[in-house]
Image (cartoon, rainbow, N blue to C red):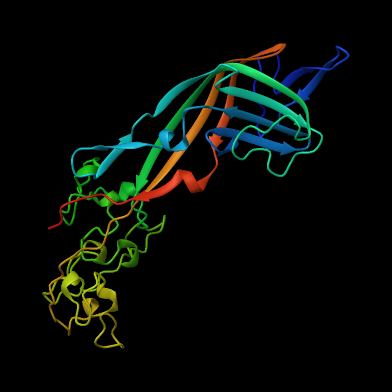
Amino acid sequence: MRKLMCLFCIGLLLVNCDDGDVITVELDFENTFKTCGDLVFYKTKTDPAESLSIFIANLSIEDILATSPVGTEGVFVELATPTREVTLDGNTNVFNYRTYSSLPDTPFCTDVPSSDLNITSDSEGSGVVTITTTLTEDDNDGIPSELEDINGNGDLTDDDTDGDGVPNYLDDDDDGDNVKTINEEVNYTEANGLANALDTDGDGIPNYLDNDDDGDGVPTRDEQSFSQDQNPANDVTNTEVGADYLNPDVAVSTPETAYSAHNIQQKFVVRLVLSDLSIPQLSLDVLDFGILDDASVTTTSRNPSTIFN
């Protein structure tokens, strides 16, 4: 856990009692938060029972994670609004620090809960919240992106082994043979890198970059003896050897007419920082609200629209 920083003290919030005394409350929350509704960011703890929440009107998590295409083919995207500032005015957009006699099971769901949910104190603040979003994309193929710089020039965007318009670091089928890279025994380890990647035909080109894995003259994606389903792995003539695309003694060519869809994994990191935050009797300098912890909205995938050879 990390303690929130106050202007007058570290990790302390001052709250008035009815008799005029001042109570010192230690804010000791995790550096992550949740989201729900339209739109509530919140974090809670049970000992003592407390919550911090930010309600923002006219903004959705979909707005925060929205991307726009770069170019015309949909291969690259960028965040539509990587940084935005929202004024917490105590009316439309609200920050709350609350204490409870006991924390409800679901203190937040579609809105900031009403004041009768075991709440013992409720402090409302104003200020500015800065929402910063970063996006990382990867093909999730078992190879670190930095090792997919085939020409070694430091630019990942110009390495496209199969010429389909999707660079290798975003391409989950680097050689375009309809066998996903992650299923071609790349055998990556931190110690050995890709030195042990499978090379069935021994031509010096590992299978994940070789469009004819068994070297029989028939492209892997066309070795479909039994079914044209964008999956050469299930075409097996000799069960003792395995799939025909790995069997140099089987060279039946059935030209493929379609290609398997590409899936690019997206990971978003959403961070909130509050500034000029004012709560009765206390002004906070900067409050790092933390990072959104919700894989259901921060991890997703997309399918680029490209022209395949």
Residue at (66%, 18%) from the top-left corner? 6
Instruction: Give 140 or 145, whichever is nearer the viewer.
Output: 140
Displayed quadrant of residue 249 = bottom left
Residue at (12%, 58%) from the top-left corner? 309
Image spot of residue 189 (x, y percent): 40, 58
Residue 116 in the image: above or below residue 23: below
Residue 18 relative to residue 219: left or right: right
Residue 38 relative to residue 238: left or right: right
Residue at (34%, 37%) from the top-left corner? 67
Quadrant of the frame with the N terminus? top right
Image spot of residue 40 (x, y percent): 57, 33
Q: Residue furthest right?
A: 19
Image spot of residue 58 (x, y percent): 47, 28
Residue 42 relative to residue 11: left or right: left
Residue at (53%, 44%) from the top-left corner? 294
Displayed quadrant of residue 241 = bottom left
Residue 82 in the image: above or below residue 276: below
Residue 169 in the image: above or below residue 136: below
Image spot of residue 165 (x, y percent): 18, 49
